[in-house]
Image (spheres, grey):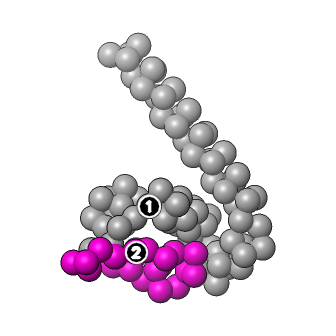
Amino acid sequence: MGEVAELFGVNASLLRFWEEEFPILKIAKNSRGHRIYTTADVDNIRLIYYLVKEQGMTLDGAKKRIRQNRDGVNRDAEIVEHEVQGSLESLRRNHRTLG
């Protein structure tokens, strides 16, 4: 859980809260009670993070949007992530040429 929380820059308590709030999150636990995140789980968290943290939606709004148009939300999130990665790469290139 700590690794996933770190990946998104959020607290583990927020991930636990989202588990209770969003039906798409069905995180399995091992025999010791530790959460086991699949790639699909991380993708769903990425989707929730995009809507709530990056788009500023309420939890109810994010739930509704996921129910109504999950594929569209995924596409929007991927586009934003791609644009951010491109901007970061551009900044790295510019920094190298200036340094």
Q: CA distance from mark 1 to mark 2?
A: 9 Å
Estimate the x, y position of residue 92 in percent, counting from the top left: 42, 26
Which sits earlier in the primary sequence, circle 1 or circle 2?
2
Pointer 1 residue: 38
Instruction: Name the residue located 66 percent from the left edge and 45 percent from the top edge.
Output: 79
- Residue 24 is covered by the magenta coloring: yes
Q: Amino acid at mark 2?
A: Ala
Instruction: Name the residue located 52 percent from the left edge and 37 percent from the top edge.
Output: 85
Instruction: Name the residue located 73 percent from the left edge and 59 percent from the top edge.
Output: 71
In the image, taking residue 85 as reference, residue 75 lies left or right, namely right
Quadrant (top left, top right, bottom left, bottom right) of the N terminus: bottom left
Q: Nearer the viewer, residue 83 or 39?
A: 39
* Circles 1, 2 touching at the beta carbon (< 8 Å): yes
Estimate the x, y position of residue 42 in percent, counting from the top left: 47, 60
| Residue found farthest to the front | 31
| Residue found farthest to the top | 97
